[in-house]
Amino acid sequence: MSSFWSDNLPKLGQMFAAIAIFLAVLAVIFFIAGKANGKKQRPIAIVVFLGPALLLLLFGLLGPAIRTLLLSFKGSASHSWVGISNYKWLFTDESMRIVLRNTIFWILFTPIITTGLGLLLAILLDRMRRESVAKSLIFMPMAISFVGASIVWQFVYKYANPNQPQIGLMSSVARHLGFEPTNWLLTQPLNTFLLMIVFVWSQTGFAMVILSAAIKNVPTDVMEASSLDGATGWRLFRGITFPMVRSTFIVVLATMVVATLKLFDIVRASTGGNFGTSVLANEMYSETFIRYDAGRGAAMAIVLFLLVIPVLVYNIINLRRERTIS
Amino acid sequence: MSLLTRNKAPKIAEHNAGRKLFGSRGATITVWIIAIFWTIPTLGLFTTSFRPKEDISTNGWWNFFTHPHLTLGNYSAIFSTSTVSGIPNGILPYVINSFVITIPAVIFPITLATMAAYCLAWVKFRGSDALFYGIFALQIVPIQVALVPLLNLFTGGVHIGTVTIVPALHIAGKFLGIWLPHTMFALPLAIYLLHNFISSLPRDLMEAANVDGASHFVVFRRIVLPLSIPAIAAFTIFQFLWVWNDLLVALTFTGGTEGIDPLNNKLAGLAGTWGSHWELLTSSAFVTIVVPLIVFFSLQRYFVRGLLAGSVK
């Protein structure tokens, strides 16, 4: 007991000290910089307000990104230049084929299913008398870590031998329906789709909440006029609702594409990337920190980045347009 | 302002009446069916964590409702400070680590981002717009791209040729070595969201303060900070959930250092080593889940508003 506290109290002390030092340093800088007057005031303010964030972005994101680009053209220990051979390996090696295939599956299916389901729920919510607990229940998994979600879903996918009772929900349901369950998470390519379900379960609430807000923004008169004209159900949706929330739909879809590309935790915690379930982001981690091939890992990170660029460009164009309109 | 709201109120009522004409009951039922499906997996975990070990391995968790057999033993086991199935001191040290990592990793980026956002929005200078777009763009750089060089920076510093730009910081495996990456990675989104909010503060207010001769530091402390509380609260929740639930950053920068490993990481590891101890795994998982759930439900309103700040106008 005493060793427990002597181990753990200092950590809390470190935390409070760090916060106190951080705030004290800021306070002192603010105090001194606030004394400056006249012509110097503006440039000093810019340096103090913007400087720390820019330095951290420079050393934390921009610099490392450039260095990773360089590393991707070097060998496993980063000593010698190897040209594009890491990229060549990535796109031609037998073991990578399945990783790339899975990554494509993930990008093709999960963003559209998640966003589509979110839109359906948003429309249904709009027709409910009052927003209920149901909305919170669907949104809830968003707060659960992907690791936690993977463990939650193990109780759905868990499989036991035929002569034993099934304690996994899916296996049990399968047996009740009259066919013998298999070890779902070992069955390819089914297992990849089962992992996608965990993602959809986790992220649909996010899509729903944002699209729900967008639908509420659709001007009242437009909806009324068209429903007076006799537009209902599907026609109302296609003619009015969807066009009005289209830009939000695409933003959510883009967010999901990026989240899917970076997805790592679900695969790591569920299967560790074994049994043919690995994806690019997971393989990047394994290559770098388990097989210690910094070059190949860096190449994968760069490919991830390249895949994200179209989404980024689209978002920036969108942002500029919105700013010029408003 | 009051005129506006008075005009708006009856309109919303009409609008709702108009929409509810079709399929209100069907919609309610469908949403509830989906909500129940969405809750069943979590319910399974929750229920299992309160069942005795022998029950868990012999029958499904749904049998709990017909044969209730409740125990708190799993929780007292994982929270005991003696060795639990190979884990010295149980999971409590990892709960503490998670808090020690998360709280500063929320405070640091939000403070720095609010400052930067104010500067970009109200202390305009040549190139400040371009800078804003640049920071916005960094938002989508996958953190995977930054991990290895940043780790190298912490362990070996930065050198160009023989010139040392930054000396080795020796903070890998320390708390500072994980607060810093979280702060760095959070900045682009934080600055973007807070900039959206702060740039929409009333211009008159800022100009009045400037006329009074208040310095930017005074304006920031007395006007911007108090008025930005809703946006700051929203991002606080966002960042709390992100850091608490993070696996990749922690895995990379704690390097498996037992003393500072957060709970979520430990849980990912335990999923392997405690593979047969479902009673310990589910109760630990539930502890991991319940903290963000509490934060989330108690501040849900802010959270939703924060999400919307970035995506819906």
Image (spheres, coloured by chain):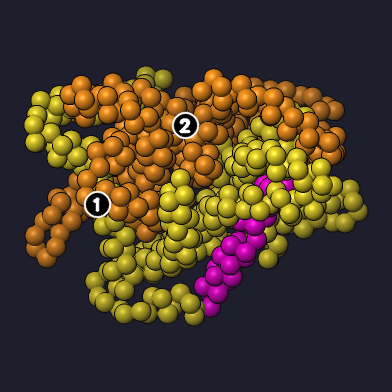
Chain colours: A yellow, B orange
Query: Magenta segment: does it hold A106?
Result: yes
Residue A85 position in % (x across, y down): 37, 79
Question: Which residue shows up at 64% across the image and 49% down it?
Answer: A244
Residue A170 position in % (x across, y down): 78, 48
In this view, B32 is above or below A300:
above
Left or right, residue A32 beside residue B17: left
Q: Which mark is residue B304?
A: none
Question: Which residue shows up at 26% across the image and 77% down it?
Answer: A81
Gap in Å between the C-alphas at discs 2 and 1? 29 Å
Q: Which mark is residue B127?
A: 1
Q: For marks 2 and 1, give the one nearer the viewer.
A: 1
**What crowding class fits label 1: few (fewer than 14 Cα within 10 Å), some (14-19), or many (20 or more)?**
few
Q: How many marks?
A: 2
Question: Which residue shows up at 55% across the image and 68% down it?
Answer: A99
Question: Which residue shows up at 29% across the image and 73% down it?
Answer: A74
Which amino acid, by three-letter code, is at mark 2?
Ala
Residue B96 visible within the image: no
Task: Name the residue nearer the viewer: B226 or B6.
Answer: B6
Q: Give the magenta part as a residue range.
A: A94-122
Both labels 2 and 1 in a single chain: yes
Q: Which residue bears the numbered disc 2?
A: B234
The chain under label 2 reads B
**What crowding class fits label 2: few (fewer than 14 Cα within 10 Å), some (14-19), or many (20 or more)?**
many
Task: Name the residue nearer the viewer: A216 or B262.
Answer: A216
The chain under label 1 reads B
